[in-house]
Image: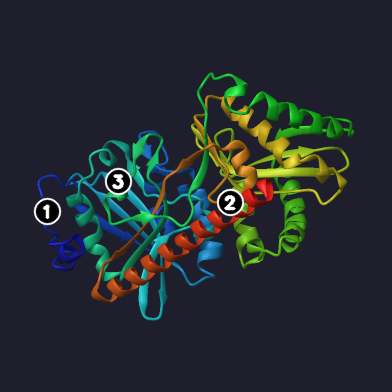
Amino acid sequence: MTMAAAMQSRTAESPARSKANRIAHVDIVTDLAEAETVWRAFEESGHLFTPYQRFDLLSPWQRLVGSHEGASPLIVIARDAERQPLLLLPLSLRQTHGVRTACFMGGKHTTFNMGLWNAEFAAQVAIADLDALLAPLREHADVLALTQQPLRWHDQHNPFAQLPRQSAINGCPLLAMEPGGAPASRISNSFRRRLKSKEKKLQALAGYRYHLATTDADVTRLLDWFFRVKPARMAEQKLPNVFAEPGVEAFVRSACLSARGEGRVIDIHALECDEEVIAIFAGVADGQRFSMMFNTYTMSEHARYSPGLILMRYIIDRYAERGYRSLDLGIGSDDYKRMFCKDDDDIFDSFVPLTARGKLAAMAMSSLSHGKRLVKQNQMLFDLARRLRQAFG
């Protein structure tokens, strides 16, 4: 019997339980406030999650962006027989063409999607546990569209990799950093020299500096600049401005202003002089990895000196010196990412039917995603062939 068929043969009240299954209760919560206490407890040590799933990032997204898009919270909390939480799934539910689709919260603004797991439980999860988790969801959703999931996080396997899965449309370029490694082990000496010679032009500017925004005033000032400049940059690249969509700016401001330890839920790194902001990179950090979310750079003549690359060098060195193990610049293989990131993170999607109606939707979503991936790969091969012809033709 397939897992999907097994799920359809059960009721939420009496899921078939194997001896291996530790999940005794599954709570479905549709109110963020009701889930907040348990959710924040999952962000403490001893848990497996990415910084994109923090409450102070996804809560404003759901409130300000998701609700505007017609997505409602569907938060799944699995507990053991003593009612201790084992897992929290931050999902949102959308209905299109009569199909109820449950996705991870965060939409296009989260690079990685994952549940928040008790780390010890995550290391032992069996298919029986996943069956028990998903069976009660049938009443609420027809299909799970769980995209952009990392295969591993901090050297621990993602338990959802046991579900039916396929490679995501894009991979994620990754820079692995050896704690205590020499600077040249993360950025070559020749690349550093090139960046230093470009930076000399910027260093001549009054008040030139790199810094991490720490005060509310700094964060607000840098975001005011970002929301002025980014639309011009997007227009120049003929790209749609996702930051202009309803609720997005308020969501970004909320997460950037939310305190977290010594930093923020989204940290903003900046290169500035007295005259202007030159470049910013904003991303999420968790003590082991920094992951870039959004960035832009000046429209002035200072853009000629590659300020984005110079800022990236500062950020890489900053986190390496603090013992971080890795850094990524988001999904997609833009040329500038490859200058820094030599490895790739495996990213997968799962389209899991929960009902008969969901089977067709899951097949359609899976085929569409697979097709896009083939097109992307062929485009990459095409571009490579074109560059080789230019180089050797």
Residue 264 falls in image quadrant:
top right
Q: Which residue is drawn at 39% across and 33% down?
A: 45
Q: Residue at x 53, y 54 (%)?
A: 381
Of pointers 3 and 2, the one earlier in the residue sequence: 3
Question: Which amino acid does the dot numbered 3 rest on?
Answer: Pro
Q: Residue at x 53, y 18 (%)?
A: 180
Q: How crowded is mark 2: few (under 14 residues within 10 Å), some or many (20 or more)?
A: few
Q: Distance between the residues labelled 3 and 1?
A: 18 Å
- Mark nearest the camera among 3 and 1 is 3
Q: Residue 313 location in percent, x, y?
A: 67, 32
Of pointers 2 and 1, the one earlier in the residue sequence: 1
Query: Is 231 left or right of 148, judged from the image as shown?
Result: right
Q: Can residue 96 be seen in this view?
A: yes
Q: Residues within 10 Å of mark 3 (few under 14, many from 20)?
A: many
Q: Can residue 73 be seen in this view?
A: no
- Mark nearest the camera among 2 and 1 is 2
In the displayed orientation, state which residue is furthest to the front. 393
- Mark nearest the camera among 3 and 2 is 2
Q: Mark 3 points at which residue?
A: 159
Dot 2 falls on a residue whose secondary structure is helix
Q: Residue 40 location in percent, x, y?
A: 42, 44
Q: Residue 270 location in percent, x, y?
A: 72, 39
Disc assigned to residue 384: 2
Quadrant in which the N terminus appears: bottom left
Question: Which amino acid does the dot numbered 1 rest on?
Answer: Arg
Q: Name the residue under label 1.
A: 17
Q: Distance between the residues labelled 2 and 1?
A: 52 Å
Q: Distance between the residues labelled 3 and 2?
A: 35 Å
Dot 1 falls on a residue whose secondary structure is loop
Of pointers 3 and 1, the one earlier in the residue sequence: 1
